Image (tube, helix red, strand yellow):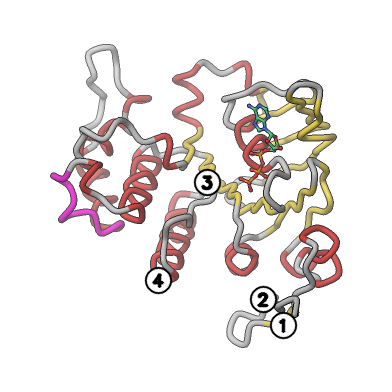
Amino acid sequence: MIEVKALHKSFHGKSVVTDVSFAVERGEFFGIIGPNGSGKSTLMKMISGVISPDGGEILIAEKPIGSYSRKALARLLAVLEQEALPPVGFRVREVLEMGRFPYQNWLGEEAEDPTPLIDEIVGMLGLAELEDRTLDQLSGGEKQRVALGKSLVQKPMLLLLDEPTTYLDIGYQIQLMDIVRSWQKNTQVTVVAVLHDLNLASLYCDRILMVHKGNQIRVGDPRDILQSSLIEQVYGTRPIVMEHPVHQLPQIILQSGT
Ligand SMILES: Nc1ncnc2c1ncn2[C@@H]1O[C@H](COP(=O)(O)OP(=O)(O)OP(=O)(O)O)[C@@H](O)[C@H]1O
């Protein structure tokens, strides 16, 4: 679904992404982790076509990302980031309807009525009682659910999530990740997610890319990546790594420095 080859990006002469290469299969849940400022968002912006790399290549569905028109790219991929929400005056339902833009003609009409799809997503994300509210009347967590809804309404083949659980309490973090995973099972969407929470990354990702200072450290399954020595090398703190008693996946426990 995605092939990233020898990607490079610099800002003002400073290299921010250096020689990153990986491939993501259709239907895979792929995580990107790394400390603050390690180039994760820059990588996501290149994969979504928002910024161009200085070197290397990105293929999506076997074609260079630059060969897609803006609308074709919007039918192919959706990006979840809170900043992508429209100005605050819009109502939740209107925001979700905007997600259908890539399928509309110049009159704002589309071949099939999107109402059943939007209703399904409203129900799944528990947005029914918020539908008529404007965005300024929502909490950070509610806005995050609306942003996810707008991405899903797009029915993308590729869903890019940049720190999707920011602003969410633990209950909503799990709820959001579960919704994405069950949606993925139903639609075979490919998910690429930047995650700060290594335990969530371990529970939900098939494979994880770890980056540090713009460099690719390792790509592997959660067991390959969540190792205390590797985490210490990259994050500068050595956690205890244990197996989750139910899911049999690695989980980290932080240790205080004193
Ligand atoms: N438009 C830009 N101009 C100049 N420098 C930039 C720009 N965008 C990002 N950077 C720099 O590139 C580096 C990587 O930033 P990026 O946002 O990709 O990191 P990140 O891993 O997503 O960080 P975080 O976890 O803190 O969100 C940082 O040093 C940042 O200051």
Say what amino acid the circle numbered 1 marks: Met
Measured in 3D between alpha carbons, the distance from the residue under mark 4 to the one under mark 2, in whole angstroms, is 18 Å
The dominant secondary structure in magenta is: loop
Q: Which residues are magenta?
A: 125-133
How would you rate the neighbour count of disc 1 (Cα within 10 Å): few for under 14, some for 14-19, many for 20 or more? Answer: some
Q: Which residue occupies 69% across, 44% down?
A: 37
Residue drawn 66% across and 35% down?
A: 42
Residue denoted by label 3: 161
Nearer-N-terminus badge (4/3): 3
Q: Residue furthest bottom?
A: 245
Left or right of 223 on screen, residue 189: left
Corner quadrant of residue 11? top right
On screen, residue 244 above or below 113: below
The residue drawn where x is 48% and y is 18% is 70
**Residue placed at 79% from the left, 53% from the top?**
219
Q: Which residue is mark 2?
A: 251
Res 171 label: 4
- Answer yes or no: is residue 63 visible: yes
Q: Quadrant of the C terminus?
A: bottom right
| Closest to the observer, 26 or 165 | 165
> In this image, 3 relative to 179: left or right?
right
Dot placed on the residue nearer the N-terminal end, 2 or 3? 3
Give the quadrant of the N terminus: top right
Residue occupied by mark 1: 242
Type of residue at label 3? Leu
Query: Is label 1 in contact with label 3 (beta carbons under 8 Å)?
Result: no
Q: Answer with mark 1 or mark 2, whichever residue precedes in sequence.
A: 1
Find out whether the residues at labels 4 and 3 contact each other: C-beta distance under 8 Å. Answer: no
